[in-house]
Image (cartoon, coloured by chain):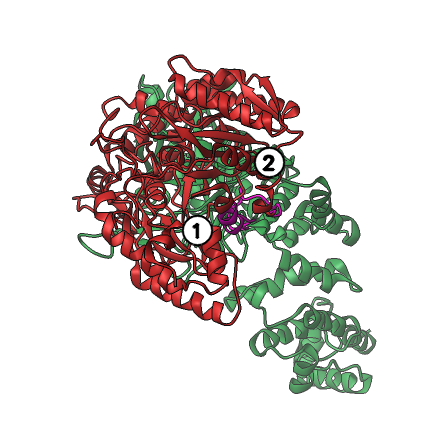
Amino acid sequence: MTYTLEGNTGTWEVVIGLEVHAQVISQSKLFSGASATYGGEPNTQVSFVDAAFPGMLPVINRECVRQAVRTGLGLNAHINLVSRFDRKNYFYADLPAGYQISQYAHPIVGSGTIEIELADGTSKPIGVTRLHLEQDAGKSLHDQSPTKSFIDLNRCGVALMEIVSEPDLRSPEEAGAYLRKMRTILRYLGTCDGNMEEGSMRADVNVSVRHHGEPFRTRCEIKNVNSVRYVMLAIEAEAKRQITVWEDGGAVQQETRLFDVARGITRSMRSKEDAHDYRYFPDPDLLPLVLEEDWVAALRTQLPELPDAKKSRFMHQFGLPVYDAGVLVAEQATADFYETLATGRDPKQAANWMMGDFFAALNRTGRDIGNSPVSAANLGELLDLMADSTINGRIAKEVLEEMVETGETASAVVARKGLRQVTDTGAIDAAVEQVLAGNPDKLAEFRGGRDKLFGFFVGQVMKAMAGKGNPALVNEALKRRLG
Amino acid sequence: MMAGSSMFDLTLAQARAALRARKISAADLTNAYLGAIEALNPELNAYITVTPELARAQAAAADAALARGEHAPLTGIPLAIKDLFCTEGVRTTAGSRILSNFVPPYESTVSGNLLRDGAVFLGKANLDEFAMGSSNMTSAYGAVTNPWSQPGGNARLVPGGSSGGSAAAVAARLALGATATDTGGSIRQPASFCGLAGIKPTYGRCSRWGVVAFASSLDQAGPIARNAEDCAILLGSMAGHDPKDSTSADVAVPDFAAACARGVRGLRIGVPREYRMDGMPPEIEALWQRGLGWLRAEGAEIVDVSLPHTKYGLATYYIVAPAEASSNLARYDGVRFGLREAGADLTELYEATRASGFGAEVKRRILIGTYVLSAGYYDAYYLRAQKVRALILQDFTRAFHDVDALVTPTTPSAAFAQGEKMDDPIKMYLNDVFTVPANMAGVPGMSIPAGLDDAGLPLGLQVLGRPFDEQTVFAVAATLERAAGFTALPSMRAGVRA
């Protein structure tokens, strides 16, 4: 299913590459001991190194390196045992040293791939060009005073992984799928929390258009788009703009653009002529980063099971269809929940209950799997109560509602509300007699050949028993009485 | 109790022995030096900042320790600290107006090591702005006058640079020793100009943490003192692995002072033929030959060696050092510390602050450095310079397969007059022609006073050694020192004109 845009002169293909900036999960910053946690009071998480005081020197944080290597391994990428840090020089008030320490010529991670899943059920490999480590900048606050700008250096020096894709993406949908998949992998690895709203994952989007079969045309880079949806909208807006430029006889100029969310358009930020000359050169304060092959190998063996592998295992081990497996592995917590639930139970029933009533109940109460009042063990008990006929399916739905409301266990709800299924044939027979006695005209109709009324009687008997009758026994009793 | 003037005659090692023997007190020693500073510093301008209260407090603590029978390697020894080392609570200017109000809340590792070992800090020594210079003329706090002058002449001479204040202070006996830094010769050239010993150890021997950076891949701290032994004692305290500096070497600090007594018997000493420059004064050539003769007489074998890429050293240096400096000095922007000149917007604030905060030589080097790193020029300049640098290192590596140390002149001339060469940066940069290669290669280099020129000014010889083999450098330098019997003193010094 190819995504194309129709212009006045023909059909256009969109070519997209993404640069994802992912904040590394670590205690401290990339080159200093200051805390890397989000949300402190301004300028409370700043060391003299971060503030670039005279004579201060960077020292690489081993944990950040470990996280970058683990991410590289998770992206099936080549790990460069020797990499190097460069200085990217430019002046800005929230860049205290006047340079950002980054990896320009020799990144820590080389090429890899990630597999994206599309709505039509197909999947597509997307090339990852490289991953490198760099420092985040601080924040300039321009809205705090009419005459001054304020600087918060808390974020300054926090480790970022810049993950660059090949220009392999061909539609907003593919770009969205890539970002979601990237986020899933990062979260599985625990290397980035993937929170685009808080800015711990950001994307720069490179877009160009061409007629099918042409070489690449000039691209534009849309900076700092902060949600998957905006990325998709920005691509479409930018592609349409570029098509108009080309079709009006102009030429797209290479430049950096910003996505204006309110107006749904991109606008120019700076042109190639205004582009910074970053004067990259190897940072003389840091030695080349040399990794031991054994250390990398050990990290590889310690990687958690990643989404693709888990999905395929769920399909084989639990007999799940591809869609169900995909939904259940999208978040590590969901996958863990499911696996606990399905183990020793009917896996298909477990998937149906989780993806159906359970997710619906969580949604309704504004919760997610992370803060669910119902644990996997508790939901499992509910399924067990069904399986051993303590309750029937209809009652189970009611019990689940109560569990989500109150956090009680299934058996506690069943006991408190007296929902145990009635299997006493005497009680069932009595209810049957009562219903038949109360509906002589319906009985006459049934006897006259209206077989469909059998369902009516089942419903009435269940109602008389407050839903607790064992459906099979009720059926059986009615058949016997009416048969 | 010793008379005031004879106290100044003690070397660092002798003063240390006298302190330990309680023949003198740290308080008396410190007060004598503070008095000398008060008397002579207005003329010499060797110190930017003097810290008498702090010095007296440190001296009192030293005396208390000595009274308890405790002593560290430098207990009670008064030193000058080059104003490039950040000192906690004491203004640190780097010789620049842009740091005129900067009081570091931290102590550099090297100065901290000296304090750990009981040293007394008299104050912060003048220097070329951001250590960029060979004359100490570029300091925003005024030129430093060399305590030496030509007998009969009245021209004020430069002490060399960039550690000109450190050298002048030690030569005029305004300190027993001083910290210095050397990026292209800034320890060895002023030591040579002031008749002192000074060693730039191997790159990575002393931590750069807390030292205001000039060119990170070249900067190295070291001492300037009256003789090789005093340098050895100071370096023993200054050196050591520092996890806060990624380029600091994790190697043990040997007993440098013991190496001074080793002698040179059986050593092979190389004489690099490329250091025989056109136009070098014959007296320097003669001094060099005399020095080689002394070493031969002490049992060393003198060998001709070739360092074929020497002629590219200076040109390469003046690409690499400004490139790194242009980036290192970007942090002086008026935003967080130091000078700030108001501007209507951020760009104006930067421009006004840096225009007013930096002197001409610093601006020149920032411009050169920015240029050589620019897109389109990087390959032709910086990248090529790095390749040449690798060749210079290879020259040394090859030479040190064959010889244990190299001996050369330290500088192509003795101290020159203040103001001379100021209009010709190339001429000024030529001062570093013999010293720069050691920085490019990271090898240790030491200057030792070996004689006087025809005008009566001191000249030094330079000893270069293998990486982390400062011990051989000390052995050779101390041998030269003993043979030279250099006893001349500058006319302006404490105890004489104090």
Picture coordinates of residue A106 (x, y %)?
55, 32
Q: Secondary structure at mark 1?
A: loop
Q: With respect to residue A65, does B323 lie above or below? A: above
Label 2 and label 1 in one chain:
no
Could you tell me residue A49's position as x and y percent? 43, 51
Which region shows up in magenta? Answer: B232-254
Taking the magenta stretch, the answer to whether it contains residue B181 is no
Q: Horizontal placement of B113 versus A428: left or right?
A: left
Report whether A178 appears left or right of B187.
right
Q: Is residue B246 magenta?
A: yes
Find out whether the residues at labels 2 and 1 contact each other: C-beta distance under 8 Å.
no
For disc 2, the neighbor class at 10 Å (few under 14, some 14 to 19, many from 20) is many
Q: Chain of mark 1?
A: A
Along the line of sight, the residue nearer the viewer: A1 or B149: B149
Picture colour for chain B: red
In the rendered structure, which amino acid carries the disc numbered 2?
Answer: Thr
Q: Which mark is residue B472?
A: 2
Q: Main secondary structure of the magenta part?
A: loop
Q: What mark, if any, has residue B343 been given in the picture?
A: none
Q: Residue at x 21, y 52 (%)?
A: A148
Answer with the quarter of the image where residue B475 lies.
top right
Asked whether residue B444 is in view, the answer is no
Comparing marks 2 and 1, which lies closer to the viewer? 2
Can residue B259 be seen here? The reply is yes
Q: Nearer the viewer, residue A73 or B87?
A: B87
- The residue tagged 1 is A199
Q: Colour of chain A?
A: green
